[in-house]
Image: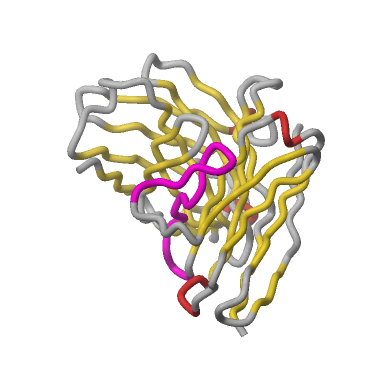
Amino acid sequence: QLQLQESGPGLVKPSETLSLTCTVSGGSISSSSYYWGWIRQPPGKGLEWIGSIYYSGSTYYNPSLKSRVTISVDTSKNQFSLKLSSVTAADTAVYYCARHSRYFDLWGRGTLVTVSS
Amino acid sequence: SYVLTQPPSVSVAPGQTARITCGGNNIGSKSVHWYQQKPGQAPVLVVYDDSDRPSGIPERFSGSNSGNTATLTISRVEAGDEADYYCQVWDSSSDRNWVFGGGTKLTVL
């Protein structure tokens, strides 16, 4: 059964770059026509789509974050990654990775990233 | 960019029917998807493509979509249905954006 697991630092300093990795297990990240995406949720707030990468390698980003976001894939490790630059306290959130098409059908458990000095 | 509007909260007594709305400009022309999120957990898809249910989701969960409003209906509400619910669409009109509504807290009285 396909599973997703986020990993990365739980604490990032302001102005630095947040880096997270999502490891896909139980199936290949490149074997089917899915997008692999990142969604975040600030404490007590709603869900925000950050961006996604298609199995072909094409990337799509939320216009509000586009200037700071990079999503990449490493098919040899069955992983995809998120980099968010120039972070501030407003970027403090639980970050989820997910598999999706029109809708998000499989989610990781999420990882809390706090931006603080 | 496309905006989805949900009421912040809905309350319902056990056994009654809860209706959670999701408003958007001509949302009836889009496919709407709904997620349930309980505290400390990742969201779970409960309805996709307006009215389809993933395997394992009770028939009590249903959806509809027309005009400027999509609705998630939960029949015979149980205490375990208390959660946050989010609607979502894929806005293919503008460089492929996936958009979430602000979420609705369902309280079971």
Residue A112 placement: quadrant: bottom left
Q: What segment is highlighted magenta in the picture?
A: B39-55
Residue A7 at x, y percent in the picture = 32, 48
Compared with residue B61, is residue A27 higher up or lower down, i.e. above or below?
A: above
* Whether residue A46 is visible: yes
**Number of disc labels:** 0
Residue A86 at x, y percent in the picture = 59, 41
Residue B14 placement: quadrant: bottom right
The residue depicted at 46 percent of the width and 75 percent of the height is B80
Q: State the residue in front, B5 or A49.
A: B5
Q: State the residue in front, B13 or B83.
A: B13
The residue depicted at 66 percent of the width and 28 percent of the height is B91
Asked whether, in this view, residue B81 is left or right of residue B23, the answer is left
Overall secondary structure of the magenta section: loop
Residue B50 at x, y percent in the picture = 59, 41
The residue depicted at 57 percent of the width and 41 percent of the height is A49
Q: State the residue in front, B31 or A68.
A: B31
The residue depicted at 60 percent of the width and 54 percent of the height is B86
Name of the residue lying farthest toward the bottom: B109
Q: Does the magenta stretch include residue A92?
A: no
Asked whether, in this view, residue A57 is left or right of residue A74, the answer is right
Coloration mode: secondary structure
* Whether residue A11 is visible: no
Residue A35 at x, y percent in the picture = 43, 27
- Specify the quadrant that holds the N terminus of chain A: top left
- Specify the quadrant that holds the C terminus of chain A: bottom right
Compared with residue B35, is residue A55 higher up or lower down, i.e. above or below?
A: above
Q: State the residue in front, A36 or B13.
A: B13
